[in-house]
Amino acid sequence: MKKQQARTPRHPQRTAASRGATLATIVAGLMAAGNASAQAPAAPAANVEAGKARAQAVCAACHGANGVSIADNIPNLAGQRTAYIEGQLRAFKAGTRKAASMNAIAAQLAPADITDVAAYFSSLVPTNVAAKSEQLPQLLKTQVTFPEGYRSTFRMYQTVNRADINQVRYLYANATAFEAAREGKPLPAGSVLMLEQWAAKLDGDKKPIVGPGGFYVPDRLVNYAVMSSGAGWGAGFPEMLRNGDWNYAVFAPDMKIRTGVNQADCLACHKPLDKANYLFSNEPLMTAAKR
Ligand code: HEC
Ligand code: HEC
């Protein structure tokens, strides 16, 4: 009897302790399940206001401030599930989901930023799918003008075959860019880069015809893409998109500017080249400048 009494109080105690442990395990398990791919065990609460501010400054350029996108090839985010948005942003950041602009943007988002923007977009009410947002005026505005006479005043420094779109492209830079490149200095205000986009001549099987040097034979000029830099030209862009003081523009074969070009596209894709003058062709330019 005495033995049993001594044992009895220990029994419920042990039960309570093991019950507590079980509960803790379940709670931890539930949290882990809810945050399947989260790195930190206890994610901080989302700051919807911070998410809204970032969305309005940056994401709005493509997805619309209210999560209704500006174009058919950009997804709406209004009312999308929080976990889905977070998951996609982590995948863009890690590079496991590939889309050049989103990879560049997500790379700049800290884990807390991802939580915040996801909470903001999922809090919005989705509208009908036909609706579109306006482009941000500050990203439509460009200082770039067509560099008249560039064929005689600029130097061509690279030719690029684009097998994915059957184009051949010729890259030119002006004297200001070349001088800086020769001295290994950052390209200053006044630098202009010209990219001619030509549809390649196709053979009977619709394959590009290859000419001298392994480059596609040009058939028809499609576009001129130009980037120029000027003092203060980047000031109106959100930091996450800004490329120093570079502005971008596209011109039609008649040299008239193509309106409605969203500079956010150009800026986002060129942004990761921040250590290379924002140029994909920085190396070829440097090499050509030293020749
Ligand atoms: C330059 C335009 C641009 C900007 C700016 C931009 N996005 Fe995107 N975003 C896109 C495009 C285009 C896609 C579709 C990518 C693809 O083809 O996979 C996309 C896809 C996404 C997706 C995946 C949606 C889905 O349905 O799978 C999420 C989430 C997203 N963006 C969040 C953001 C957030 C948050 C910001 C701001 C911090 C932002 N984006 C800024 C262009 C942009
Ligand atoms: C999806 C990514 C992407 C987007 C969006 C993009 N570019 Fe580029 N850009 C490139 C790549 C890659 C090159 C290198 C040449 C090539 O492969 O065509 C390049 C090269 C250039 C060059 C020659 C200088 C350099 O960086 O090497 C200019 C000028 C240029 N782009 C202008 C533009 C303009 C204007 C826009 C917006 C309308 C734009 N780009 C949007 C990827 C992009």
Image: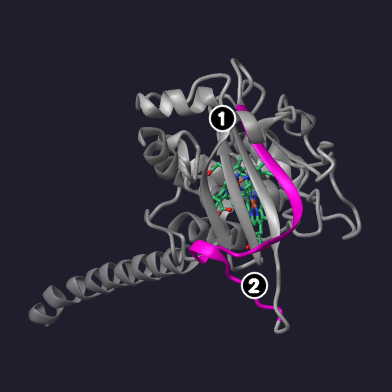
- Residue 151 in magenta stretch: no
Numbered range of the magenta stretch: 206-228
Which residue is more in the foreground, 91 or 162? Answer: 162
Amino acid carrying label 2: it is Pro
Q: Secondary structure at mark 2?
A: loop
Do we see residue 191 in this rendering?
yes
Position of the C terminus, as image quadrant, is: top left
Q: Nearer the viewer, mark 2 or mark 1?
A: 2
Amino acid carrying label 1: it is Glu
Residue at 61% in and 45% down: 117
In which quarter of the view is residue 211 placed? bottom right
**Label 2 near ligand 2 (CB < 8 Å):** no
Which residue bears the numbered disc 2?
Answer: 208
Which residue bears the numbered disc 1?
Answer: 239
Do we see residue 108 in this rendering?
no
Q: Secondary structure at mark 1?
A: loop
Find residue 126 and report its horizontal and vertical position in percent. Answer: 82, 55
